Each structure stands twice: as structure tokens, then as C-alpha cells.
């Protein structure tokens, strides 16, 4: 059996090894024109015939010999003895070298009269005007664009020759179920080969996804053998992550050799690189973000050895909103949200967990922390690599602070206004601190002061010299979610799931505990934290906790009993100086709309009488 991580190589060492072990080669093939968009041409493509192949009329009119029209003028009209009626697109017969528009003629008997001479070749599309036979249509190494398909058809190209890299994707794992299936406990939806196929075909490769293979060495061996016989590259998914059923490296070693087992990258360390009969074979880790990193940083760059074009993403210099710490000795890739505030770019790290797939969905950039670095400090300028077009990032609206389910619906409504909303859940207090540093456009907040008021006292404390506008999203019900309809007084001795320190929900909980004379130590699980209301409700529904505190809409969405504790004011804090930002204006108008109030009514647990109102804290 191959020893795990016998020799972990750096990312650069792995990239260099691939190019040295597998010399560059260009594999070609012909594809039907209707499937050629996005493929890379392997050689120049030349027109098979001229377009047009013969002289054509560009107007409705008469075909004439220009020499017969020389004497025509307003004072001396000429009646043409030799002219032929033609329509747009008709062939211009031999012997004629001009077309006169029909409105510039009149008939005298069966002949045409004119008052103006015709220049040679006027209103005629000469043969080869668009392209002459044997002229080049596209050069080699060109990614065929969708609108070029029509042109290739026009020039007689039906089977263009393109770079043809065949990649076989073999998903392994007894726990896998097909997409669209709701997994039972212990099962996992197979998504990595879907992601890999989309990414690799976008680069111009041709992918085949093979059926799932259970964790059986003989079955994996047979599947990998078949894939190696039918493809130029093989990728085995999910068999290289940590676990008792790790057969990928052993199978590759039996059929060929393992070149790399372990790469000094995070996420993605369990990656495998091997060879079977000169065919490169890769082992993808099972965690989605690990698989994404290996595809993006190792496999996609390697495809350039086959002549495929992998565009380099754009990088933006931005200010980091919180520190990123890591150990020296590995390259780390951190998903981020990037946006422009005023005249500067700011970037906020997302969750680092390799299994947290939504961090990649919610992000629009990533940061690479280099091999020999211990990380980056808060406020440091870093390079953020875009995963969306720059224009999309420029239009993004950054929200940092408290979570509420209605923010998802606000995100959807703003997307219809072409304003991407990127939300980071750090709690109400964390949001105000981000707003203080001008690192977000708005901070959702619901902080309860000892006097029973919401938000204003905290803004005066943490942003004392900044004019802040508070946009009311709604007044909402906070309460106890449980499976048994527990009240606040029932919490002592019950397993609890809490919100993070600095969140408005945590402050409300502590306020009520003190008011009712209940010690936090009486709540087992008080120290366990969740970052969203949905996460609290889910922990209760799954049985991990007996109770937690969340908003009514979260409990309702999971069908759980809810006992109200308080009605609080949920607002968006906005620096007044950013009120005229078009993205902020779009957000305000959306929240003030009837459609947004309708969403609140459907979700339940919200009072919208104050929705859209703005109060200013100086």
C-alpha cells in the first residue's frame, strides 16, 4: 500500500514536475460545427470558397455597363440600350460592371432612362468581397466564439479541426448519490466531477463522466483502466481524501506509478498525481473546495501543455478587512468577498473550511497566501484574484453584520437591479466595527441597549464622530425555537445552541437571562456558537440541541415551534456619505418597495409598518 503523504511537494514543484514528466503535445480532432464553440483551433482554418463566389447586386435596380452611362446628366438624360433588371442579391450578368438603384431610373417603353452616370462597380458586391477562396478564417490557437459558428458555416467549414484533449472523470465512493437525490445520513451528492467537467470543458477539453464506483479496489481498478484506455487524461474523484477507504493511490501504483501523493496547498493537500502508460492521472480530494483548488491551481494550468488556452484571471489590489494567519510551508487559498467603497477596494475572507462549498458560491475572489508567508495582517494590501468579471465586482454591494433570512430575498431583488449583494455574517457589533473602518456599505444590526432602545446607543459609542443613517428593514420577532414548544423559563438544563459573541441575538439572550435571574451556566451548550438564525434552527431540528434563540421566519422555514421573547428593530446602518452611491440607493429603494413588504408578509414574524423609514444618528 502507498504510504500517505510520503513526500509532500510544494505547488510549484508539482507544476514543474508535470511539465517535465509529460512533455507538451497537441492532440487534435475534428468536431461537428454545432459543437465547436469554445474549442481551440489546432491549425489555421481557410475558406473553401469565395463569399460571394460571383458578383452580386447590392441594390434593387438595373445592371449596366458603366461606360454606357458616361454622358448622362440632368440636362441630357440617356436611354440605355443595354440594361438588365436585378434585385438585391441577384447575380450581375457578365459584361455589366455597375448597378443603378431603381428609384434613379424610369422606363421609356421597354428601356430604362437615367440622368446620372454610374461609377464602375457601384452597388455591386464583387466576388470575394467578404472572403476569397483560400483566405484564412481563423488562426491556430483561437478559441472559437459562438458568433463565429455562422461565419465558419458560410465559408464551407463543417468539421473544424480543434485541439482535442479527452478527459475521463471517475467518481468513487460507496456514499455517493446522483445529483437531484436528497442524501440520507452518511450519503453525499456527487458534485465534484460535475464541477470538474464544467471547468475543463470551458478551457476547451472534452470530458466523459463515468458511472459511480463503489469503494472496492477491483472495481476502481477496472474503471481507471477503462478510463486510461479511452482518454488522454484521467481524473479520479473523492478517493484521495483521508479515510479508511483510500484506494486511489494503490490502484494507480498497481497500474502505473504514483508521482505525487500530497501537495503543500490548503485546501487540497490530499491531491495525487500519477501515470498509467504515459497517461497523466490525477486524484481529486473529496471535499469540494479542495477539489476546486486542485483543478484551478494544478490541472487547468497543466492543460496549456496540450495547447489549450487557460486565461489568467484578473487581480485587484485591495485592503484586507481581517487577518489571515497560517503556518509556513504551504500555499493557502482563501475565498473572499471583494468590493469597492469610495475610491478603494476592500476584501473580506470567508470561511476556510474545505467542506463549506457555499463560501465559494458567495465569494467573488480569492487570496493566495504564499508558501513562505505566515499570513496577512488586517489592513494590509493584498492581491485578490477575481472569479467574476471586474465590472460585476465593481457593482457589488457589501453587507457586514447581523444575519436575517430576509437578506437572501433582498439579495435576489437587488440582483434584478444588476446589483450583486455580498453578505458577511459577523454579528451586529462586528458589522458596526466594519462600518467604523469604512469596510462595508451597510451593517445589519439589532443591538439592544439597557434602556430597551435599539442600535442608536451603540452607534454613538462605536461611531461617535460619524453621521449614520439607520434604514429600518422591519421589526421582527425573536424567540425560542425548539421541538417541544419550550418557553424561556424552560431553558435551564436543556441543551442550547447560541449565537456568536457580539451578535444582537446573543445580547438579547443575555439581557433576558439577567432579567429573569437565570445563569448562563444553567444552559448546557451556551458556549456553542452558530453564525446564522437558520443554523440555530437546523441544530434544533437535527436534535443536536433542544433549543436556541432565532427569528420567527427561521423557525417557520424548518417547521419548528416558536415562542416569542421580544420584538426588535432590525436596521441597516449606512454611513451618510455613501447615501448617494447608486448601489446604496438601489438597496434603499428596494427595501421601501411594496414587493419587499410582500416578502416580509410571506416569511412571517415581521412587522413592516416602519420598513423603509430612515433615521439619522449624528
Image (tube, helix red, strand yellow):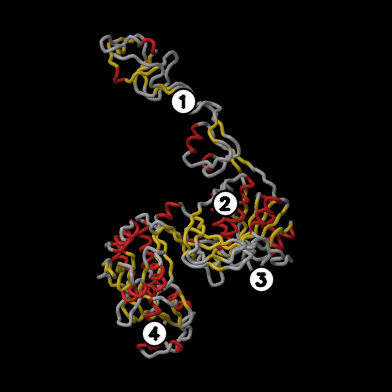
Query: Residue 444: horizontal and vertical position, in percent?
Result: 36, 69
Which disc number belongs to residue 244?
3
User: In the rendered view, would you say 397 is above or below 77?
Assistant: below
Label 1 Cα crowd, 10 Å radius (few <14 / some 14-19 / many 20+): some
SS at mark 4 in the image: loop
Query: Residue 235: horizontal and vertical position, in percent?
Result: 63, 56
Image-based side of 169 in relation to 75, left or right: right
Q: Assess whether mark 2 and mark 1 are in contact (beta carbons under 8 angstroms).
A: no
SS at mark 1 in the image: loop
Residue in the picture at 73% in, 57% down:
257
User: In the rendered view, would you say 568 is above or below 589?
Assistant: below
Q: Assess whether mark 2 and mark 4 are in contact (beta carbons under 8 angstroms).
A: no
Residue that carries the numbered disc 1 in the rendered image: 129
| Front-most of residues 57 and 131 | 131
Label 3 Cα crowd, 10 Å radius (few <14 / some 14-19 / many 20+): few
Say which label, 3 or 4, has the lower sequence index: 3
Which image quarter is the C terminus in? bottom left
Q: CA distance from mark 3 to mark 1?
A: 68 Å
Say which label, 4 or 1, has the lower sequence index: 1
Q: Nearer the viewer, mark 4 or mark 2?
A: 2
Say which label, 3 or 2, has the lower sequence index: 2
Q: CA distance from mark 4 to mark 2?
A: 51 Å
Label 2 Cα crowd, 10 Å radius (few <14 / some 14-19 / many 20+): many
Which disc number belongs to residue 197?
none
Residue in the picture at 70% in, 57% down:
274
Which disc number belongs to residue 200?
2
Q: CA distance from mark 4 to mark 1?
A: 82 Å
Query: Residue 415: horizontal and vertical position, in percent?
Result: 38, 57
Say which label, 1 or 2, has the lower sequence index: 1
Which disc number belongs to residue 486?
4
Amino acid at each position: 500500500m502507498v504510504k500517505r503523504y510520503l513526500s509532500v511537494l510544494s505547488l510549484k514543484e508539482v507544476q514543474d514536475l508535470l511539465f517535465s514528466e509529460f512533455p507538451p503535445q497537441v492532440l487534435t480532432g475534428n468536431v461537428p460545427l454545432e459543437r465547436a464553440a469554445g474549442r481551440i483551433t489546432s491549425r489555421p482554418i481557410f475558406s473553401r470558397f469565395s463569399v460571394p463566389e460571383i458578383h452580386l447586386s447590392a441594390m434593387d435596380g438595373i445592371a449596366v455597363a458603366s461606360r454606357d452611362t458616361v454622358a448622362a446628366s440632368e440636362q441630357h438624360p440617356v436611354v440605355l440600350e443595354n440594361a438588365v433588371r436585378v434585385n438585391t442579391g441577384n447575380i450581375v450578368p457578365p459584361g455589366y460592371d455597375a448597378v443603378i438603384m431603381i428609384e434613379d431610373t424610369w422606363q421609356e417603353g421597354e428601356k430604362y432612362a437615367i440622368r446620372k452616370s454610374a461609377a464602375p462597380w457601384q452597388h455591386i458586391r464583387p466576388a470575394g468581397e467578404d472572403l476569397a477562396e483560400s483566405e484564412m478564417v481563423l488562426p491556430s490557437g483561437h478559441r472559437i466564439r459562438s458568433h463565429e459558428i455562422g461565419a465558419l458555416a458560410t465559408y464551407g467549414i463543417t468539421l473544424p479541426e480543434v485541439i482535442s484533449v479527452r478527459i475521463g472523470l471517475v467518481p468513487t465512493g460507496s456514499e455517493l448519490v446522483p445529483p437531484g437525490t436528497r442524501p440520507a445520513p452518511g450519503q453525499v451528492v456527487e458534485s465534484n466531477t460535475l464541477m470538474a467537467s464544467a471547468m475543463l470543458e470551458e478551457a476547451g477539453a472534452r470530458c466523459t463522466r463515468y458511472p459511480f464506483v463503489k469503494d472496492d479496489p477491483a472495481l476502481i481498478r477496472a474503471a481507471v483502466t477503462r478510463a486510461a484506455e479511452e482518454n488522454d487524461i484521467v481524473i479520479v474523484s473523492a478517493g484521495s481524501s483521508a479515510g479508511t477507504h483510500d484506494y486511489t493511490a494503490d490502484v494507480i501504483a498497481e497500474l502505473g506509478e504514483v508521482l505525487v501523493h500530497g501537495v503543500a496547498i490548503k485546501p487540497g493537500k490530499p491531491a495525487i498525481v500519477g501515470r498509467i502508460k504515459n497517461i497523466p492521472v490525477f486524484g481529486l480530494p473529496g471535499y469540494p473546495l479542495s477539489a476546486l483548488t486542485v483543478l484551478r491551481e494544478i490541472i487547468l494550468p497543466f492543460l496549456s501543455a496540450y495547447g489549450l488556452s487557460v486565461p489568467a484571471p484578473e487581480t485587484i489590489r485591495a485592503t484586507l478587512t481581517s487577518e489571515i494567519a497560517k503556518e509556513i510551508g504551504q500555499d493557502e487559498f482563501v475565498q473572499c468577498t471583494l468590493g469597492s467603497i469610495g475610491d478603494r477596494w476592500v476584501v473580506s475572507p470567508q470561511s476556510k473550511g474545505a467542506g463549506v462549498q457555499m463560501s465559494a458560491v458567495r465569494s467573488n475572489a480569492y487570496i493566495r497566501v504564499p508558501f513562505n508567508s505566515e499570513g496577512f495582517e488586517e489592513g494590509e494590501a493584498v492581491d485578490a484574484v477575481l472569479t467574476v468579471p471586474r465590472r460585476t465586482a465593481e457593482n457589488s454591494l457589501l453587507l457586514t453584520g447581523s444575519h436575517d433570512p430576509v437578506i437572501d430575498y433582498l439579495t435576489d431583488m437587488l440582483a434584478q437591479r444588476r446589483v450583486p449583494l455580498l453578505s458577511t455574517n459577523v454579528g451586529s457589533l462586528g458589522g458596526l466595527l466594519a462600518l467604523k473602518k469604512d469596510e462595508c456599505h451597510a451593517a445589519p444590526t439589532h443591538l439592544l441597549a439597557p434602556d430597551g432602545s435599539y442600535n442608536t446607543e451603540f452607534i454613538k459609542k462605536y461611531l461617535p464622530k460619524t453621521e449614520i443613517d439607520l434604514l429600518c428593514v422591519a421589526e421582527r420577532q425573536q424567540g425560542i425555537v425548539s421541538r417541544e414548544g419550550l418557553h424561556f423559563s424552560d431553558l435551564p438544563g436543556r441543551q442550547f445552541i447560541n449565537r456568536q459573541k457580539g451578535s444582537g441575538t446573543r445580547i438579547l439572550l443575555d439581557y433576558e437571562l439577567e432579567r429573569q435571574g437565570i445563569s448562563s451556566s444553567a444552559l448546557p451548550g451556551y458556549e456553542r456558537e452558530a453564525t446564522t438564525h437558520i443554523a440555530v434552527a437546523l441544530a434544533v431540528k437535527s436534535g443536536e440541541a433542544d433549543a436556541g434563540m432565532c427569528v420567527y421566519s427561521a423557525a417557520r422555514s424548518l417547521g419548528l415551534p416558536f415562542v416569542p421573547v421580544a420584538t426588535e428593530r432590525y436596521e441597516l446602518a449606512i454611513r451618510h456619505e455613501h447615501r448617494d452611491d447608486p448601489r446604496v440607493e438601489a438597496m434603499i429603494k428596494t427595501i421601501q418597495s411594496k414587493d419587499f413588504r410582500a416578502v416580509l408578509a410571506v416569511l412571517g414574524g415581521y412587522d413592516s409598518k416602519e420598513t423603509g423609514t430612515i433615521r439619522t444618528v449624528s
